Amino acid sequence: MIMQTAPFIYLLILISFFGCKQDSKIDVSELSDYYSHTSIEIEDADSMLLELTPIAGPEVVPSPSCLAVLPTGELFVGVDMMGSLGKEPGKGRIMRIADKDNDGNYEQITEFVKVDNPRGIMAMGNQVFVLHAVFNDSTKIAERMDLVVFEDQNKDGIADGPSIPLIKNICSPAILSKRGTDHATNGIRMGIDGWIYIAVGDFGFHQAVDRSGTKLTMLGGGVVRVRPDGTEMEIYAHGTRNIYDVAIDPFMNLYTRGNTNDGGGWNIRFNHIFQTGEYGYPSLFKNFTNEIIPALADLGGGSGTGSYFMDDDRWPEQFNHVPMMADWGRNQLFIHYVDMDGPTFTQNEKAFIDLSQITDVDVDGSGRMYLSAWDGASYTGSPDKGFVVKVAPIDLEYEPFPELEKASLEELGKLLQATNGVSRLHAQQELLKRPESEVADISLQIAKDTAIHLASRVAALYTYTQVTCENGIAELMKISEEPKMREFALRALTDRKPCLETVPLDLFIENLKDPNPRVRAAAIVGLGRMGQPEAAEALLKLETPNTKRPEKGTEGPHATPNPDIILPHLTVKALVQLNAIDACLRAIDTNPHLALWALSYLHDAKTVSGLVAAYEASDHEALKREILHTLARLYQQEADYDGSTWWGTRPDTHGPYYYSTTWDASGDINSFLTKELKSNPSQKDFFTGLNERYRLKISELGTAYTEKSHEQPQVDLEAIKNKKGQVGKSSIEDVIVAMGETKGDAVQGKALFIQQGCIACHSVEKGDAMKGPFMGQIGSIMTRNQIAESILKPNASISQGFASILIKTKQGKTYMGFVTAESAEALTIRDIAGNATEIIKEDIESRKELENSMMPPGLVNALSFEELASLITYLEQQK
């Protein structure tokens, strides 16, 4: 580490800084231009401008789940022949593929290492980072997922030895062993800030531990980050559903594309991820959308997988400066054109490259893109399916990437100024291995040079930050005086908690008033990370819109961009980090919405007594009602998560908690609410509404909830499946061929959907009773052939999450069917005839997932080819 600056000199620098008035102008023109695509016709984003070249097929890379490429073009492909639902170990490995003479022939193929369920790969220098499942040697059962790093110092394409663990247990082991990795922890990617960002599926994790001993638990999905040496692990954002990767742009904006719910009808959501942000799945995103950061778009059905932010000026403008998102279900690599909107973005999605069940995407230092495709390898993998391709603009001239280890400091500095993100990131990581003082000098020089483009200045800024830690604070403060660089300097100052002890609080408080909302966002997040309670008073002066709660029985706008909610949301998160109970109680009169919002997360007896006092002192009825809402929100809290359970593909979305539990002050809240109802009997409906909205289960407050009943059709499936028509008399192969040649009539198909008994187990409208696999978006998830195969061979194509469940109760009763709803206390199981039964979990003796589908084979045997084609056409249109 660079020699520490003398304290009295540092103090003089601070006095000098605050003695000069900071430039309060806003300058986002270069940043805005970076994302803008107004000069091109988006409809012209034509992939015909690209050349696609096959690299390897299933003989080398069967069932490729993920990939990564070094800047020099060596490709690492994760082979996962267990797939998302397989449970047999020994079927995973990482293959290294290289074309050393660039003749288009990938002549160097080696098995880099054997690992089970590789779900994320990142290659950096002589290191390959891998996120994968670990099986117990004795039981052969998956017991955890780890983030590890392998080294290849002799560069022979084979890992030198065992891996070095960076994070252990970053998945809930009980669920991993029962189901496989379909909702587990997935892609990894490094940002220009040097952190590794990890996409966590909604299995969540319990007691993950990094190399420094830090332990974390997270219920549900989100983004976690860790330093490359396996230290400083922290939760970055929470409340995503089942993300598979994170795209990161040069300015440290993160983007994710969620994976469709397997039955609830909640579609892909494209998110801009903020540090500390809460995205609400599953407990807040329907009924408590006023508390979350909404998605930028709901994109319908699909299955988001790998992602990448394209930042390479060698690519055509219409493909550059955009998040690219792979969608396994739609067989597409999509482009999201993002435009700045205050502190966040709006987006416009366009289909880009067709690829059969695409799984991942990465780019090398010469500008060549690599894509992996599952290509029908099924949910449990296949040795006969899958491939990898290379994609490049047709006019791209190959430029060999330099050997970074042999590059001089000056050459690395030039690469740090490149107009592509791959060169900047890998040059930065090589610079961090060089003498610290020299790296600090060259990176600071680039960061301060106003003639250099913004992406390179930001890359240099983070290089300087990583090499200097707390000793770079004074220079970062100077850089923050420039409006264009201010948000990045503020983020860098508080980016690493071990380096922020002497970061000045006043700098961040001053920037809460900056005219640029992106700067204000950085200042708010920074104040939360600094942890100094004195910041609370300044945070509570922020103006905030009074967001509305969704009306009863309606789904809130969880996928409508709302830039106005970002700063208040981040402020509340910062106040909670500061445990700012006293400051929030004092602010109830001056900024009630923000203060009460923050207090609703601060479970402390002092919070409760303070709210009661504020209620009794107020004569404003509207404010008193909001205080009652806050007390009701505080009545329960989320129970400690032990990693033994998962909410399934149809979780209870009522909220505000999933595994709710009372706490020390719950009794006081109960007494106060019931007392107030007795004093105000005319307000019975209001208190009943509180009881229902927050699930208080306080009988004195009453209830008005009645479950909506659904008439279920009675269908004789046995009679249907025993009939023999054209379909029943033909081989499956002949039927599949015929379905490709026969268009069918969707209107007739809709009638057949009812006639053939499909309606007994499947719904197509979100408002319908939840039964078996939801068909309302099946056309976005499966191709025509896949739909046909799932009908003809139901046991070979069981939809994820909808295997038959056999439940035996302690009372001796047996139930078999689909679990269509599940909370922490109870579940609903629906049998093959459509009859639903609610079972209290405490009454369950055993619960077993059966290997066969509940859908009997032969249900379409009596149909003609034309009729079956009509049924498939109808389902294909459900998107």
Image (cartoon, grey):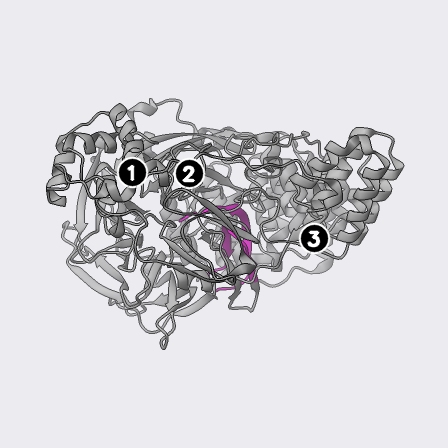
879 on left or right of 709: left
Asked whether 138 falls inside the magenta stretch, the response is no
Judging from the image, what secondary structure is the residue with disc 3 in? Answer: loop
The magenta region covers 216-245
Q: Are marks 2 and 1 in contact (CB under 8 Å)?
A: no
Q: Secondary structure at mark 2?
A: loop
Mark 1–mark 3 Cα distance, whole angstroms, equals 44 Å
Q: Identify which residue is drawn at 34% across, 25% down.
A: 42
Foreground of the two, 169 or 855: 855
Relative to 316, residue 821 above or below: below
- Which circle marks residue 332 in the picture? 1
Residue type, mark 3 in image: Gly
Q: Indicate left or right for 480 with 70 as reference.
A: right
Outermost residue, right side: 617
Q: What x and y, as percent, mark residue 298?
A: 44, 33
Identified by mark 2, the residue type is Ile
The residue that mark 2 highlights is 268
Disc 3 target residue: 531
Query: Which residue sits at x=50%, y=30%?
Result: 340
Residue 393 falls in image quadrant: top left
Label 2 to label 1: alpha-carbon separation = 14 Å
Q: Which of these two is toward me, 40 or 9?
A: 40
